Amino acid sequence: MSSFEESEWSRKKHVNEFVENADIYVLERRRLFKILKSFFRNFLENRINERAIKVLDLGCGNGVLIKEILSESHKVKVVLVDGSYEMLENARENFKRHDFDYIHATFQELLENESTVNDRLFYDFDLIISSLAIHHLYKEEKKALFMYIYNHLNPGGYFLNIDVIKAPKDELESWYRILWSEWIAENEEEMKLREEGMYNKESFVNLPEKYKNNPDNHPDKLLDQLNMLDSAGFEDVDCYYKYGIFSIFGGRK
Ligand SMILES: C[S@@+](CC[C@H](N)C(=O)[O-])C[C@H]1O[C@@H](n2cnc3c(N)ncnc32)[C@H](O)[C@@H]1O
């Protein structure tokens, strides 16, 4: 079993570095958010007349995904889960004026049947989202988490996962890392132009290479993960977006 405590996410320095720089190196981050918002508008917003939409964010970080959803609608009831206390504090700070629930727990803890954490996840959700977090789990753990997600959705509820995946071939994986580096270089140039002399960060173009060698990352192939969703019982399973190793996929209960 993977251990959160041994991962870089348990270190404050790493958490701060991500929060500060993710917009520079997460490939097409703005586009990923736009797709999430369009998904929300298309499949969930029409239910709002009835009641608030219940949303669960797994591996919420500082709450960026929820912030994007709030820009679409405030009629949401939100639970945020993260293994990092630091990240959850960041999220709390960002949503001071909202009455959201915060659960400090690792995915591994959620999957322990007898875990008291689950007593706090008392209702079923209309939407479960996650971004760049589930690839930290091994394949069997992902399978179990997808089943857990299915079991915590209302009938007709959706799961949308933004995550990095493993390419089906090493040659493709190498090229996807090059694509990623090229995108980072382009994005850094644009940011420099926008910030006119204020931009003073080191370059992140080597990050894709570091990602490859990072023992915390356990990405699985997209097809395998779509099949896992299918086996968990999800319907309409599909990949909604893909650019190199970055993808958005999910399904409906
Ligand atoms: C790359 S950050 C993404 C944060 C946020 N979702 C975003 O897109 O900005 C990964 C997040 O997943 C959390 N995480 C990683 N492994 C986890 C695990 N096993 N259980 C719970 N949270 C985990 C980290 O603490 C971190 O907040």
Image (tube, rainbow, N blue to C red):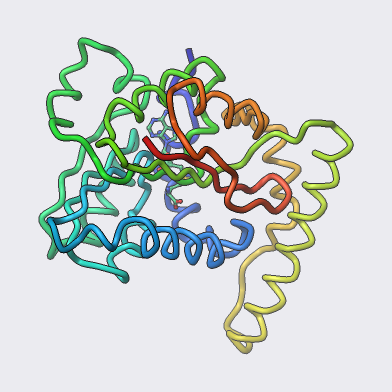
Looking at the image, which residue is at 59% across and 56% down?
Answer: 26
Foreground pick, 3 / 162: 162
Picture layout, residue 131 above or below residue 200: above
The quarter of the rendered structure image containing the C terminus is top left
Give the residue furthest to the right: 171
- The answer to whether 244 appears left or right of 104 in the picture is right
- The answer to whether 244 appears left or right of 78 in the picture is right
Residue 29 place in picture, x, y as percent? 55, 62
Q: Quadrant of residue 94?
A: bottom left
Residue 192 place in picture, x, y as percent? 66, 80
Residue 240 place in picture, x, y as percent? 57, 51
Foreground pick, 125 / 93: 125
Picture layout, residue 229 above or below residue 144: below
Looking at the rendering, the quadrant in which ligand 1 lies is top left
Looking at the image, which residue is at 37% across and 56% down?
Answer: 43
Picture layout, residue 44 above or below residue 236: below
- The answer to whether 107 appears left or right of 22 in the picture is left
Residue 137 place in picture, x, y as percent? 51, 25
Q: Quadrant of residue 23?
A: bottom right
- The answer to whether 128 appears left or right of 240 in the picture is left
Marker count (numbered)? 0
Looking at the image, which residue is at 35% across and 30% down?
Answer: 149
Looking at the image, which residue is at 12% across and 56% down?
Answer: 51
Foreground pick, 88 / 248: 248
